[in-house]
Amino acid sequence: MILDLFKLDGKVAIVTGANTGLGQGMCIALAEAGAKVCGVARRSCEDTKKAVEEKGGEFFEIIADLGTTDHIDHIISEAKNKFGKIDILVNNAGIILREDAINVTEADWDKVIDINEKVVFFLAQAAAKEFIAQGTGGKIVNICSMLSYQGGIRVPAYTSSKSAVLGMTRALANEWAGYNINVNGIAPGYMATNNTTQLRNDSKRSDEILDRIPAGRWGTPDDMMGAVIYLCSDAAAYVNGFTLAVDGGWLAR
Ligand code: NAP
């Protein structure tokens, strides 16, 4: 039965940035599809845990600051201690800092690149080591952006990091496909989360953005659910290094 390929029963997923926004939506989706979810965040994931449990799923919180690589070993070992293995990593946590390029400081540049790019790579590497040691293969989904394709305005470090993650997704897919590890990306469009509060509060920018979205609305965490389930499932077994836009048609314009 084709729909069985989308089921994630018995799988263990790590999702970063699990306390809110798109990460929270993807935790709920993965749990509904049958996976046990380890949510990583620097503060409590109480709401996500509640939402997952209401759907009959299992959620385990791992508190860690993803601003450095220091906690990666801890995240992997906590997930393994709790559920015995790892099958899926969703590299979702990220930040955006808005500033004219001419004024961006080195400290702010590093802050964005460290979490959005460096930690994404080393967490993917740590997960892949587990998948290889387990002999199971696995799935890695990196959260990209429209700014993996476009330049954006006043977010040069963010654009650099998200463009890098798209390239990294291809590079890792090439190296690890032979281990039955699928590395893919999702590029969300303009979604109503904390990440875009500033934009949505700027009525001029908000109107400009809405006017350009063929679907005529901002996306929501629910809009990510189908894409993440697909890419984390056996239905996508032969999909490698591809970044799927979930953007209401933004890139099609
Ligand atoms: P969000 O609501 O701001 O969520 C970002 C998540 O990352 C939060 O859980 C946040 O935790 C976590 N995070 C940030 N810094 C962290 C750190 N140092 N350590 C641990 N966790 C940290 O925004 P979102 O829209 O859901 O963003 C999720 C991903 O989608 C990000 O990679 C973002 O760049 C990407 N994205 C979003 C959009 C959009 O329109 N919203 C579009 C394209 C791509 P705290 O709550 O503690 O800050």
Image: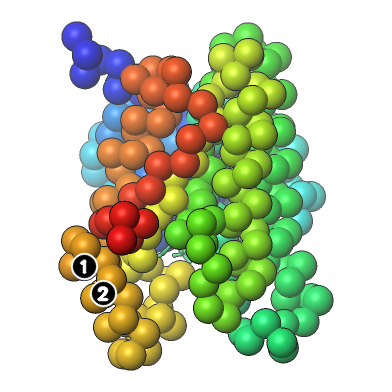
Near mark 2 (Cα within 10 A), the count class, few <14, some 14-19 or many ≥20, is: some
Disc 2 element: helix
Q: In this view, does 139 lie above or below 168?
A: above
Q: Position of residue 12 (x, y in %)?
A: 48, 27
Judged left or right of residue 225, residue 123 is right
Quadrant (top left/top right/bottom left/bottom right) for the C terminus: bottom left
Which residue is rendered at x = 63% and y = 9% of the image? Answer: 135
Q: Is residue 242 left or right of residue 51?
A: right
Q: Position of residue 99 (x, y in %)?
A: 62, 84
The residue indicated by pointer 2 is 210
Which residue occupies the foreground of this view, 182 or 14? 182
Circle 1 — which element?
loop
* Ligand 1 neighbours mark 1 (CB distance < 8 Å): no
Q: In this view, does 145 lie above or below 203?
A: above
Who comes first in sequence, dot 2 or dot 1? Answer: 2
Estimate the x, y position of residue 98 in percent, counting from the top left.
57, 81
Q: Residues within 10 Å of mark 1 (few under 14, many from 20)?
A: some
Q: Residue at x 24, y 39 (%)?
A: 55
Is 57 or 26 nearer to us in this picture? 26
The reply to whether the residue tagged 2 has its Cβ within 8 angstroms of ligand 1 is: no
* Res. 65 visible in picture: no
Question: Which residue occupies 21% across, 67% down?
Answer: 217
Mark 1: which amino acid? Arg
Task: Report the amino acid beneath label 2.
Answer: Leu
Of the 4 image quadrants, the one containing the N terminus is top left
Looking at the rendered structure, which numbered label has been put on residue 217?
Answer: 1
